[in-house]
Image: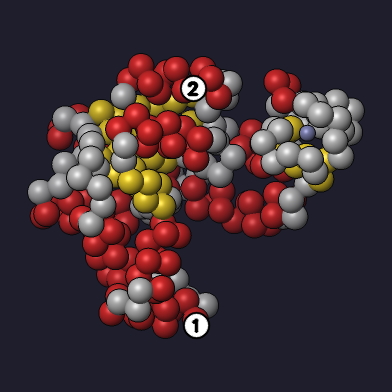
Amino acid sequence: MNILIFGPNGSGKGTQGSLAKKKYDLDHIESGAIFRKHIGGGTELGMKAKAFIDRGELVPDDITIPMVLDVLKNSSPNGWLLDGFPRSIVQAQKLWEALQADGVKLDFVIEILLPREVAKNRIMGRRLCKNDNNHPNNIFIDAIKPNGDVCRVCGGELTARADDQDEDAIDKRHNIYYDATTGTLAASYYYKNLSKEFGFKYIELDGEGSIDDIRATLMAQL
Ligand SMILES: [Zn+2]
């Protein structure tokens, strides 16, 4: 079972992805792990990639795509869930060509739909409980709104992660994701078009629902 998942930061992509991963016992392959494996392992591609990263440049697709394919090929026989790649229409096209050339079948593509403002609020609204990381609090989500300024579960003190308050960084990532012409949404739509012709299932999930609702919809379709 081979699955691609798309969703903006703040859409709960990680949570829904891990459900799909568990259901089919898949390898969860995310783009950061691909780079770490090749750079950490000192492979030829990894060394080439590192040279670009060290210069503060984007790693070209000609290096990234073979690294992705290598990790996919060496993953669990049960299949993989690819998360965080492709990010652009060009990467989507090149990945598809490479999968076709290798005879690798794609079974599902999942897209989590969430308006940009909602995604941003979800990130910026996250609050961490000092007593327990597993106490979800978010000032913009009614179901898990903090109790005043303390944790809704235990009454503990809440803090916000600096990353979650970095509006420029969030906007930059969302600029790439929500670009439906050349960016990640364009990549997602590229697979949506292919799905009809090549017989894999394209699942659209409404990211504005509760985690349980999204989970139920996803599980019913996988
Ligand atoms: Zn708490």
Judging depth in this view, the residue of 95 and 159 nearest the camera is: 159
Q: How far across and down, in percent of the image, does residue 141 sit?
A: 70, 27
Q: How far across and down, in percent of the image, does residue 155 sit?
A: 86, 30
- Secondary structure, mark 2, is helix
Which residue, given by chain and number where applicable, does mark 2 sit on?
A: 214
Q: How far across and down, in percent of the image, does residue 207 sit?
A: 53, 28
Q: Answer few, some or many: residues within 10 Å of disc 1's Cα (few below 14, many 20 plus, some between 14 and 19).
A: few
Which residue, given by chain and number where applicable, does mark 1 sit on?
A: 55
Contact between marks 1 and 2 (CB within 8 A): the answer is: no
Inspect this view and state whether residue 193 appears.
no
Q: Is mark 1 within 8 Å of ligand 1?
A: no
Question: As displayed, is residue 153 above or below residue 168?
Answer: above
How far apart in space, not on screen, are marks 1 and 2 (Cα)? 41 Å
Q: Residue at x 18, y 51 (%)?
A: 99
**Horizontal side, residue 43 vs residue 120: left or right:** left
Amino acid, disc 2: Ile
Q: Residue at x 64, y 57 (%)?
A: 169
Amino acid, disc 1: Arg
Q: Answer few, some or many: residues within 10 Å of disc 2's Cα (few below 14, many 20 plus, some between 14 and 19).
A: some
Inspect this view and state whether residue 201 appears.
yes
